[in-house]
Image (cartoon, grey):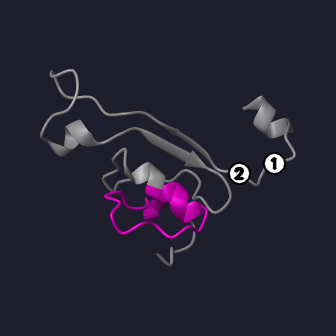
């Protein structure tokens, strides 16, 4: 994080920290929503500060969120959806 703070890109990039989900007592996978949700932290321009994401968030939503940040049209076949709750402004997509 120090390198980011010292970088000329400071304030111009988003940082995402996430991990895959694990199953409850099953090592990986599962059938309940609690077993499929992921830890997710995002910070940067246009991202709400100190916002707790209450919408369900899954691993394939990360790519859709990055596409939304970059204002890239998401392919119709993608399963993921942008984590809209994280953004300061309402997304057009």
> Residue pushed farthest bottom?
92
The residues tagged by marks 2 and 1 sit, at their Cα atoms, a distance apart of 6 Å
Q: Is 64 on the left-hand or right-hand side of 30?
A: right
Span highlighted in magenta in the image:
64-87
Q: Position of residue 11 (x, y in %)?
A: 77, 52
Q: Residue at x 36, y 69 (%)?
A: 76
* Residue on which the image places disc 2: 13
* Residue on which the image places disc 1: 9
Q: Is residue 65 magenta?
A: yes
Residue 83 visible within the image? yes
Q: Residue at x 30, y 53 (%)?
A: 56
User: Between 64 and 23, which is closer to the camera in this rendering?
Assistant: 64
Q: Is 44 on the left-hand or right-hand side of 90?
A: right
Q: Is residue 85 magenta?
A: yes
Q: Is 71 on the left-hand or right-hand side of 93?
A: right
Asked where in the image residue 79 lies, by quadrant, the reply is bottom left
Evaluate if marks 2 and 1 touch, with contact meaning CB atoms under 8 Å apart.
yes
Q: SS for tag 2?
A: loop
């Amino acid at each position: 994080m120090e390198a980011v703070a010292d970088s000329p890109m400071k304030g111009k990039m988003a940082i995402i920290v996430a991990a895959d989900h694990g199953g409850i007592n099953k090592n990986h996978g599962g059938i309940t929503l609690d077993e499929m949700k992921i830890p997710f932290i995002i910070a940067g321009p246009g991202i709400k500060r100190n916002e707790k994401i209450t919408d369900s968030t899954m691993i394939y939503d990360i790519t859709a969120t990055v596409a939304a940040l970059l204002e890239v049209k998401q392919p119709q076949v993608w399963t993921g959806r942008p984590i809209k709750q994280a953004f300061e402004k309402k997304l057009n997509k």
